[in-house]
Amino acid sequence: MKMKSAYIVSYSPFSGKTSFSLGLGLVLKENGYKVGYFKPIGVGIETEQGKFIDPDVILMKDALNLDKSYDEICPPIKCKIGTYEFVKKYQEDRDYFRDNIVKAYNKLKDEYDFLIIEGRHRIQSLFTYRMDSINLSKLLDSKILLISNGVIDDIVLQKKLIEGMDAELLGVVFNNIDIPLEEKVKGELIPIMERYEIKFYGYVPEKPMLIAPSAKEYHQALGGQVLVGNKYLNKLVLSFHIGAMRTDSAMRILKRFRDYALITGGDRSDLISRALENSDIALLILTGNLYPEVRLLVKAEEQHVPVLLVPHETSVTYNICQNVRAGISPDQKQKIQLVKESIEENIQWKEIYEDA
């Protein structure tokens, strides 16, 4: 039987392509299907050996227990996308990258019932080089599954673009939909998609835990030192707040939140102590390289609260925190389980398999 596949794409970054791919793969695997994963073009982090490995590939290889190497799942291209070296290589040999992708795909295509192919952060990325997700979906003979935030104009436009390039749209999934938008999906958006003959496979409701960065991700963005709590950096942070006001006023506000990060100077001993004792704090970020009292570090360790010391002033730290985006790492088992349950409960996953 011919292997089925779906090319997972979106038209904007941070759409949840990887979490959807992860959840779909886990659900299919749990139901007896042999599931593989392929990322034609990775966006890698450089390892000590000088190789680029995409974090999404690391996650999917681990979570799906794939017995393939990183290079088999995401073909190496020996230069970083978008660099001068990449452009030069493309100009010298226009088929080099596409040939690499096809060779890697051909080694996988007979081994699985279903292959999840994940596109880049935007469907149009690398269109200039004919290496965008639409062109590659045709190259790999795979239908496109669009992950959307529910903007109907963008969805219809993408359908026209995909079909205008002689590719095939499998359908649409809405991801991370908040409660106010749920009624709009049912009453307005689904009828419009039906009118345009767009297959809709369901939507995943917003879950704070899935979009919450970990303390480790804040540390990676901010730099600085981990004073205590290295082993608790996987804690999820649902919100972050500046502790700039008087202690009593700040505590009245902070007690309303759970699993939050407090951004304040290390010299705010009273506020830090009260926050550790009387609120559900997940992370303490101390600004301006101001060290706290040792007793507060002891208390933070006892409460399993990581403490970061960063060189930036408070306002700069806050701005950096605003741009931190949550990923999923292999050791975040609770998050991975929640992703699987979200797909299982809300998405017509069996129809996706059958229609692919």
Image (tube, helix red, strand yellow):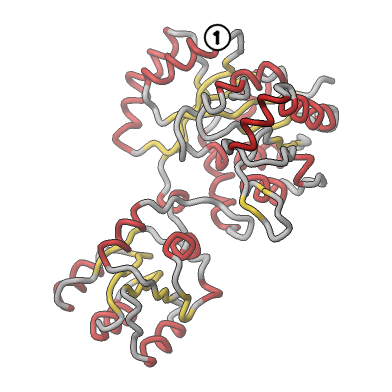
Where residue 201 sits: x, y (%)? Answer: 53, 24
For the N terminus, the quadrant is top right
Q: Does residue 108 lie above or below 60 as drawn?
A: above
Task: Out of 174 and 135, give the one closest to the viewer.
Answer: 135
Q: Position of residue 67 (x, y in %)?
A: 82, 46
- Kindly indicate the quadrant of the structure image that contains residue 118: top right
Instruction: Give the quarter of the image for residue 7.
Output: top right
Residue in front for this viewpoint, 34 or 6? 6
Image: 154 above or below 291: above
Task: Check disc 1 and report the residue beneath it.
Answer: 163
Is residue 147 found left or right of 136 in the rendered image?
left
Relative height, residue 316 to residue 147 (above, below):
below
Which residue sits at x=43%, y=19%? 155
User: For the residue carrying disc 1, how many other residues have a C-alpha within 10 Å: few (<14), some (14-19), or many (20+)?
Assistant: few
Q: In the picture provided, is 26 more to the left or to the right than 83? A: right
- Residue shown at the point (55%, 52%) measured from the top left: 328
Residue toward you, 236 or 40? 40
Q: Amino acid at mark 1?
A: Glu
Can you say which quadrant of the picture contains the C terminus? Answer: top right
- Left or right: where 98 falls relative to 287: right
- Residue drawn at the location 35% of the way across and 57% of the way down: 320
34 vs 153: above or below = below
Q: Residue 249: where, in percent of width, then height?
A: 14, 73
Where is residue 225? Give x, y as percent.
46, 75
- The part of the image, by quadrant, that contains residue 56 is top right
Q: Residue at x 39, y 27 (%)?
A: 150
| Mark 1, secondary structure of its residue | helix
In this orientation, which residue lies closer to the viewer: 125 or 144?
125
